[in-house]
Image (spheres, rainbow, N blue to C red):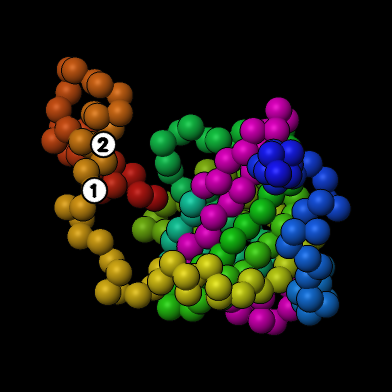
Amino acid sequence: MGDQMNKTNMPLTSQDTLRDVVGEPMELAITKELTRLDPLCRKFIAMSPFLCIGTAGTDGSGDVSPRGDPPGFVQVLDDETIVIPERPGNRRADTLCNIIDNANVGLLFFVPGLEETLRINGRAEVMRDSEILETMMVNGKIPKLAIIVKVDQAFLHCAKALRRSKLWDSSQFQQKTAFPSIGRAILQQTKTADISGEEIDELVEEDYRNNMY
């Protein structure tokens, strides 16, 4: 009995063992995968104001970062190519650095109110084509860079995760007071002594006002 318990507590180290536990996917889960964008994928991208992009460095370390703008901010150049504007951020540039080192990326597109999501996997580059960047101007400001993605896989993902989480259910929304402000959180995490949480909040809000684009 003890040996059996020890085995079941061990991490899975092979796909064969994993399949013994989770089983095989339905045929439809495989056949729905596309190698290029069809009209429905294009429509979903045009409706989406928000995505998450997953990247990994050469050392294997992973990162997931959000990107958001008005719906349609991601441009479809053709059935195999999309472009994501790179707006001003905190200058960590984790996503961009990873893409330069490792082109493989995964994207997850959301549309508020829809429970399905769109997944795209492909290969990315950091680009600064002025002709394309100019088409992404907002409030008179042109992004300095963009991420261009060549699509390898595209498919719609079912609603189970969003239904379980009730992500779009307004009755589940938290009050802002349920979590510390960004300034107070940073102060608590970094133990910064020479600046207050209120001062950090004001710096952040000033950045929002002046540097969103």
Could you tell me which residue is drawn at 20 percent across and 36 percent down? 184
Quarter occupied by the N terminus = top right
Task: Name the residue nearer the viewer: 36 or 11.
Answer: 11
Q: Which residues are magenta?
A: 36-65
Instruction: Identify the residue under disc 1.
Output: 179
How many labels were placed on the picture? 2
Where residue 86 appears, as percent x and y from the top left, is 52, 48
Q: Label 1 is placed on what type of residue?
A: Phe
Q: Label 2 is placed on what type of residue?
A: Ala
Q: 31 left or right of 116?
A: right
Distance CA(mark 1)–CA(mark 2): 8 Å
Where residue 93 appears, as percent x and y from the top left, is 53, 35
Tag 1 and tag 2, C-beta contact below 8 Å: yes
Q: Give the numbered dot on residue 185.
A: 2
The quarter of the picture where residue 74 lies is bottom right
Question: Within 10 angstroms of label 1, few (less than 14), some, or many (20 or more) residues?
Answer: few
Could you tell me which residue is drawn at 59 percent across and 61 percent down? 108
Which residue is situated farthest in the right direction here?
A: 16
The quarter of the picture where residue 7 lies is top right
Secondary structure category for the residue under label 2: helix
